[in-house]
Amino acid sequence: MKEIHSNINIIGGGLIGATLAYSLSLLDLKIIITEKKEAYTNLNYNDYRTVAISEGSKKFFEKINFWNDIKKNAQPIKKIKVIDRKISNSLEFDNNRRSSNLGYIIKNRYILDAIYNKLKKSKNVKLINDSNITNFQYENDLIVTNLNDCKIISNLNIAADGKHSFVRNLFKTPVYTKNYNKNALVLTFTHSRDHNSTAFEFFYKNGPLAILPMKNIKNKHSSSIVWTNENYYLKELLKLDNDKLANILNSNTLHSVGRINKILTKQLFPLSAHLNTKFYENKTIYIGDAAHSFHPIAGQGWNLGIKDIENLFYLIQKYKSLGIEIGDSIFCRKYHSDNFYNAYKLYQITDKLDNIFQIQNPFIGLLRSTGLNLIQKNKKINNMISDFAMGIN
């Protein structure tokens, strides 16, 4: 059977896996991407799915010379407005004290396009498509990934294969999961009023509704919505024609971006969170959604995956500078300690925020209103929350 040798085998070539491969290729490592699907070369240009890039992630992209490849397609977020039930209970964040934005919204395909263009030019990254992993074994302090037609021999495997990680299931790594028993409705749409680079987050009794500004689509003002609600309700909404659905959305968004003119895409996703009890196995580490996922209330889940990449980048850089081989048990435990607490903290924040904003008790509602007013008036607290949104804490 054919043998392929590498320093690192990355299992999963999506947004996180491909970004990881590119960043580590800058450290003169031989990288393999093992991807079970076709190569990300013929992307669906009707795919409007987006990610929110925090200012912290942007700074890392600048460090690895990637930001310039995507910035023209990234819509800045200059302001965030938070509304609890009604417009009178509101809070506003901006970046007036800094020469930077609160974040950026960009379509997934623009990131994948740019990152794979870089990977194609890299001499030390190899992509293996349509791969079917049968098992893993260990030989002479190396990990062997057995495929149907070849085997990959590496110092380290990195599982970047998503929320329902095949690698995690194969190793039976313990994981804590929480099912919110709700769905998230994700839409892209055009609207009558300029969003002015403002994101909105409405908190209703059944869950938050976020409006995220996008670059214009065919010269029309555009945004996306992520709306968490009861499963049965969102499923009924999907049965409506787009005009009726737009009317309901207009009411729930308080016409904050004007009138919704045209719904371009709509998808429904089950809402759950998970956290691996450890981010490693023998010569294997988990990254991004393979390690953790969260309630979307804070919009920081993908950025935490980028933080995983950044921490791993600097850890490997340090090992190389000391001439130490990567992938041993000390290395894997160090990666876990660098990243687990960040994930645990974000899980707690998102979970508790969801609970607080759904409580219907009038007294709690008064506390929320008082708290929003306090945060609006107290610049120190406001700035701390802004920094969290920017991913620079």
Image: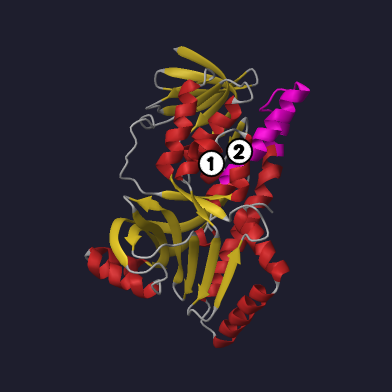
User: Which quadrant is the C terminus positioned in?
Assistant: bottom right
Is the residue 154 above or below the residue 66 in the image? above
Residue found at the very far left of the displayed protein: 241
Nearer the observer, 335 or 42: 42
Dot 1 alpha-carbon crowd within 10 angstroms: few under 14, some 14 to 19, many 20 or more? few
Query: Marks 1 and 2, how far apart in space?
Result: 37 Å
Q: Mark 1 — residue? A: 172
Look at label 2 and name its amino acid: Glu
Q: Earlier in the sequence, mark 1 or mark 2?
A: 2
Viewer can see residue 174: no
Nearer the observer, 172 or 37: 37
Look at label 1 and name its amino acid: Lys
SS under mark 2:
helix
Residue at (52, 51) in percent of width and height? 104
- Please tell me in which quadrant of the rendered image residue 138 appears: top right
Question: For the residues carrying marks 1 and 2, which lies nearer the camera in this image?
Answer: 2
Viewer can see residue 239: yes
Start and end of the magenta stretch? 305-334
